[in-house]
Amino acid sequence: ETAKTIRKLHDITKIDNFGIFCEGSRDNTIEYNVCFDCGKGVTIHSTDSGATSENFIVRNNLLMDCDATINVSRYSDSASTLQNVYIYNNTLIGFDGGVENYGLTIGNVSDIEFFNNIVYGDPNFRLANK
């Protein structure tokens, strides 16, 4: 299977749902993108029972004012596997006028690393919701 790269999708703005969405896949790199005011900036999600989603790199992105700037979650507690997610060198900015939003949401993932990211925002912008 060939690795996939999502690169330089500039000006993904004002989308109620997902800016960039990867579901049920593996070996993906998401880099050099700009997402602004989306429901979820970047989402990595596993799918149906028994599926394995793995080996994701999210790096060098600018993600601003999304309800969940980066969302990494599994379909359900026992249905599938989501593993080996590396999130680094991103800028996450959150100013949403009093609405609670998150830089990173994580649900039922194994082997996730979040490092060397810039996270900045108002008091309602939380780094993580787990």
Image: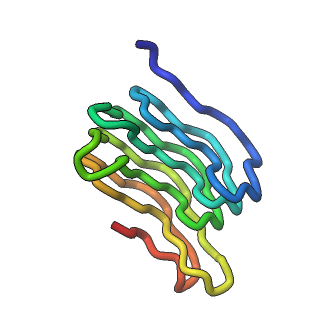
The residue lying at 43 percent from left, 48 percent from top is 88
The residue lying at 59 percent from left, 32 percent from top is 6
Q: In the rendered image of this protein, does residue 50 appear above or below residue 69?
A: above
Residue 83 seen in the figure: no
Q: In the rendered image of this protein, does residue 34 appear above or below residue 39?
A: above
Percent from the top left, x then y, of residue 94? 60, 71
Q: Is residue 29 left or right of residue 53?
A: right
Q: In the rendered image of this protein, does residue 50 appear above or below residue 121?
A: above
Q: Is residue 91 left or right of residue 28?
A: right
Image quadrant containing the C terminus: bottom left
Residue 42 seen in the figure: yes
Colour convention: rainbow
Percent from the top left, x then y, of residue 40? 58, 57
Quarter of the image where one finds residue 63:
bottom right
Percent from the top left, x then y, of residue 76? 32, 50
The residue lying at 40 percent from left, 26 percent from top is 27
Percent from the top left, x then y, of residue 35? 67, 52
Image quadrant containing the N terminus: top left
Q: Is residue 120 left or right of residue 44?
A: right
Quarter of the image where one finds residue 60:
top right
The residue lying at 28 percent from left, 50 percent from top is 109
Q: Nearer the viewer, residue 92 or 18?
A: 18
